[in-house]
Amino acid sequence: MDNRYQVAELGQHEDVLEAIRRLENRLSEQNGKAIALVAYSAEQPEDEQ
């Protein structure tokens, strides 16, 4: 199972972006350092689907 990852296109999903921002803030507070989350979409290669 070799997934290929691409940056997820979330520009039209403001609710998802806000959820990610809230989680970044919560993790940053818990960790004491800034945390940045990156969203990727995983796609399986054609021959493995």
Image (cartoon, helix red, strand yellow):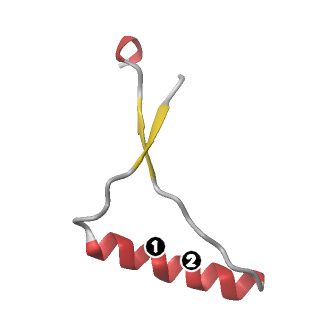
Where 21 sits versus 49, above or below?
below
- For label 2, the SS is helix
| Residue at 47%, 38% in the rendered image | 5
Q: Are marks 1 and 2 in contact (CB under 8 Å)?
A: yes
CA–CA distance between discs 1 and 2?
A: 6 Å
As drawn, the label of residue 20 is 1
The residue under label 2 is: 24
For the residue pair 33 and 48, the one nearer the viewer reads as 33
- Residue 2 is left or right of residue 45, and the answer is right
Residue that protrudes farthest toward the right in the picture: 32
Identity of the amino acid at label 1?
A: Ile
Mark 1 crowd level (few <14, some 14–19, many ≥20, 10 Å Cα): some
Q: Residue at 41% across / 16% down in the picture?
A: 48
Residue 14 at x, y = what percent?
27, 74
To which quarter of the image does residue 12 belong? bottom left
Q: Quadrant of residue 41?
A: top left
Q: Residue at x 41, y 20 (%)?
A: 45
Find residue 23 and report its horizontal and vertical position in percent.
53, 78
Question: Is the residue 41 above or below the residue 20 in the image?
Answer: above
Name which residue type carries label 2: Glu
